[in-house]
Amino acid sequence: MRDIGKEILNYASRLGVDYADVRIVKRQREELVVKNGILETANINETYGFGVRILYKGAWGFASSFDLENFKSTVDKAFAIAKATSSVNKSKVSLSPITPVKAQWKSNYVIDPFQMSFEKKLNLLFESNKIIREVSGISIAISEMEFFKEDKIFLSSEGSEIEQSILESGAGISALAIEGNEVQRRSYPNSFGGDYRKAGWEFIEELNLLENAERIAKEAVELLKAEPLPEKITTLILDGTQLALQIHESCGHPTELDRVLGTEASFAGTSFLTLDKRGKFQYGSEIVNIVADATHPYGLGSFAYDDEGVPAQKSYLVKDGIFVGYLTSRETAGIIGETSNGTMRADGWNRIPIIRMTNINLLPQDKSFEEIIESTEDGVYMSTVKNWSIDDKRLNFHFGCEIAYEIKKGKIGKIYKNPYYTGITYEFWRNCDAIANEKYWRVWGVPNCGKGEPMQVARVGHGVSPARFRKVKVGGK
């Protein structure tokens, strides 16, 4: 891969470009889904190709192909796009400086799932599915797992040569109870496919799917008979699965600097965190600290170098409640007088890199989860993402969870079905008065973050522990 990459880069450089980079990417993905005792999906696919990005007279050109032997026509296409764009582009691109590197890196894992037997994977899926279906009242049982591997080489005209290899694994189970027109669902360890991690088969075994299958099935049936959560303003405690999405939508997306500058709006809108707010805006309470951390050992948003060759970093987005930083690229960082904090990633070889979340983490505080519950006189504890909506500025939001628990005088009580909560981003985070400690902190994997046009799917992570918020509107429709 490296030799052909150098040939592509040398050819691009001879065209007289200001800058060029080449990514050669090989991806493998395996998806397995068992539904009601039937193998519904068994899909293994592999893609391989390259993308070349050219900067000429302050304008970008990008082209890609799976045909590496006949690369010249693809490079010529990228150069032609850059030339045409430069003739009409009034705002010239300027890249913030980096130090070129030559490096190799691969993510940590113990057992390669692509080397595991198909039979062993299916046995776990069928067995967990069987346990769910044995609970009376369950109509649909779903067991699923996914494995992802990417080998990538990045070469730039500035002299960088970087090879990276990542391996990711994930799995989850869901139980659906149906009565008339009503459907109640419980999922483990999270909804939308479960949880994902930069790890091997050992992570699938750690999830304990079999040990949790009967519990979630019984909870789904129990929800059918539960009362809907009454509408009121109360204290809300969120578990990690839901809080991860809250951070994703109300902090991750609005801190993407391309949204703030108005050069990107597809699929997630723009942002209320405009340039004038940086360093001044009270985003949350004083205990709210949020970082972008691409260096975490197992987050889906971890790597060694982004797709511009910028080293993985940990930087504050919100510090002591004040909004302080953006997710940047080399192009956008230069506009605000900084160097990139390394968040440019592309969805495979045939997409141009754009700013993407890495691992956007809410840092833990000092209380145990039990202490947070015990010190709550009256409130609601919600768990597991069900549905959500947030406006294009990332301000007004509405989130639904799979289940809620009443909290009375410091104790968890009965369950409620169809729980919702709504709010305005900065008011919500300013009312955060407790965050659980490191013991309860975990990075949740999100493999399906959409952005761009044509849409690109990024694999990102969110580190959280349960947290408490005051004066939140819950319930209703």
Image (tube, helix red, strand yellow):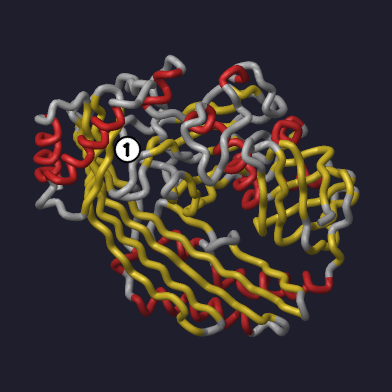
Query: Relative to 266, is 214 on the left or the right?
Result: right
Nearer the observer, 390 or 366: 390
Residue sticking out furthest to the front: 88
Residue type pointed to by label 1: Asp
Whether residue 119 is situated above or below residue 413 in the rendered picture: below
Q: Residue 289, position in %: x, y?
A: 61, 29
Q: Is residue 313 visible?
A: yes
Whether residue 420 is situated above or below residue 288 in the rendered picture: below
Query: Relative to 341, is 256 on the left or the right?
Result: right
Q: Which residue is mark 1?
A: 307
Whether residue 395 is situated above or below residue 196 in the rendered picture: above
Q: Residue at x 63, y 36 (%)?
A: 393
Residue 217 found in image quarter: bottom right
Q: Residue 470, position in %: x, y?
A: 81, 38
Query: Relative to 339, is 374 on the left or the right?
Result: right
Q: Residue 22, position in %: x, y?
A: 22, 39
Q: Residue 118, position in %: x, y?
A: 35, 76
Q: Residue at x 55, y 79 (%)?
A: 129
Residue at disc 1, secondary structure: loop
Nearer the observer, 163 or 93: 93
Query: Relative to 128, is 476 on the left or the right?
Result: right
Q: Residue at x 34, y 54 (%)?
A: 167
For the residue carrying disc 1, how many other residues have a C-alpha within 10 Å: few (<14), some (14-19), or many (20+)?
Answer: many
Q: Residue at x 37, y 25 (%)?
A: 331
Whether residue 115 is situated above or below residue 119 in the rendered picture: above
